[in-house]
Image: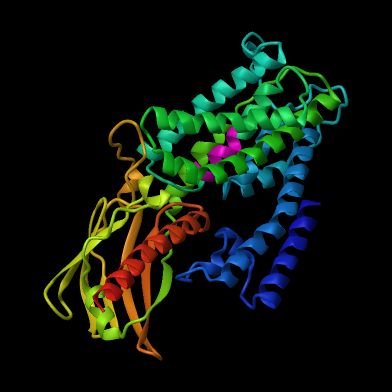
Amino acid sequence: MGVTAFALKFLLDWLVVTRVFHRSWSLLSYWRPFGAMASITSLSLENRIFAGTMLLIAVPFLWLGLAVTVKRLRDAGQPTWLAGLFFVPLANIIFFLILSALPNAGSADREEGTPWPGPRFLDRVIPLSPAGSALLSIAITAALGLAFTLLGTTVVATYGWGLFVGLPFCLGLFAVLTYSYRGARDYGTCIAVALLPVGMLGGLLFLIAIEGVICILMAAPLALFLAFLGGSLGYVIQSAHWGRRNAAAILSMVVLLTPGFYGIEQLTRPQPGVFKVQSTIEINAPPEKVWQKVVAFAEIPPPKEALFRAGIAYPIRAEIDGHGPGAVRHCIFSTGPFVEPITVWDEPRLLRFSVIANPAPLNELTPYGHIEPRHLHGYFESHQGQFLLTALPGNRTRLEGTTWYSHSMWPETYWHWWSDYIIHRIHLRVLNHIRRVVLADL
């Protein structure tokens, strides 16, 4: 069944990719998710539709694969928590080969492969009451989440799939399996138990000055969704187990899987793509007047936008040393200066510059004065920028600002949606200020 499902999925993927999106697709494409997009410097609307379509196609097959894996583990008398290996790249291929070769256990009265791999001392640890087991599950899961978050951010120093995908999914699964140790639980309570530890983890990261409010809020939608998926899988596993036989059991999925995700990322070291953000306004003045304020501009009034008041870095003023190509522009932000050597000086049409120094992307919103998570340094890099001035009828100018950047945080598509929005807001702060000062001088 598994081979048939994979063949069907490959055929469906191939038809959609080659016939609808007119791209190439092969078995090798599965080794790198969205590998067909790896060389694209920015995600256009078409590419975002492509990514969303491929994810929608994958969801039913993902669920089918998990169901088949769990069923095969039961037939072989193996603990069903091993189904988590389904998500570990490379290791899952070896896992599937071994699983397909294992014989059926054969006896209806055998000690069933349970969702929890022993030991019996947890009979004395897990409370008998549903409320007690729920509270213990939430506390243990939040503590494990904190430990693995510290491992990922301070030791491995990887803000990637293991931290933002593998960890919340495994936490949701782990919490539900812990909660259901003593007996079958209903779906709504399982999901609550899966989501609460992730929320508590965010609070702990804030309280012990590991992260600020902004970064926690940006990561929350992805983390909660994946915890929901993990909790749903945990519910299905425990429901099937207790529906068949009331046997003693235990849990420990996240302890085994999360380091595996970190290890794979350390070995593969995915390379970040380069993204492009463009923002445009029109000004009722000729390009010659606008150019003077583009090259350098006076201080912008303090921001009123909640985004910048919460800590996201925002532009304050721009200064320039020299004239023409080779001059060095300094765009002063609330966290420090961008250093921008001029590469193209085509007055009054195009000002293009490289970026050789980046300040921190934000000041963390925290009650502890100032904290310095690793992702504030080197994980977001602006590479190049430009201002393009286009003359319009009626002595008007279209002013377009563009930034090319990359970030080393995965899933790349999820985080670049955030960064695109933030950069666009930064562009508009500068462009609107230029328009105001140009019109004021007329």
Where is residue 298, by image quadrant?
bottom left
Q: Main secondary structure of the magenta part?
A: helix
69 and 376: which one is in front? 376
Percent position of residue 381, x then y: 33, 59
Percent position of residue 21, x then y: 65, 75
Percent position of residue 188, x then y: 74, 31
Q: Is residue 386 above or below residue 208?
A: below
Q: Is residue 400 above or below residue 7?
A: below
Q: Is residue 41 above or below residue 159?
A: below
Find the residue positioned furthest to the left: 322
**Any part of residue 253 in sight:** no
The residue drawn where x is 52% and y is 37% is 258
178 and 337: which one is in front? 337
The residue drawn where x is 41% and y is 74% is 281
Find the residue positioned furthest to the bottom: 393
Residue 306 left/right relative to 346: right
The residue drawn where x is 65% and y is 44% is 86
For the image shown, how many numbered marks are present on the structure?
Answer: 0
Q: Is residue 82 above or below residue 351?
A: above
Quarter containing the C terminus: bottom left
Find the residue positioned furthest to the right: 108
Where is residue 110, by image quadrant?
top right
Give the residues in magenta: 162-171
Where is residue 333, by image quadrant?
bottom left
**Any part of residue 40 in sight:** yes
Residue 224 left/right relative to 187: left
Q: Is residue 44 magenta?
A: no
The residue drawn where x is 75% and y is 36% is 73
Residue 290 left/right relative to 111: left
Percent position of residue 202, x then y: 48, 34
23 and 109: which one is in front? 23
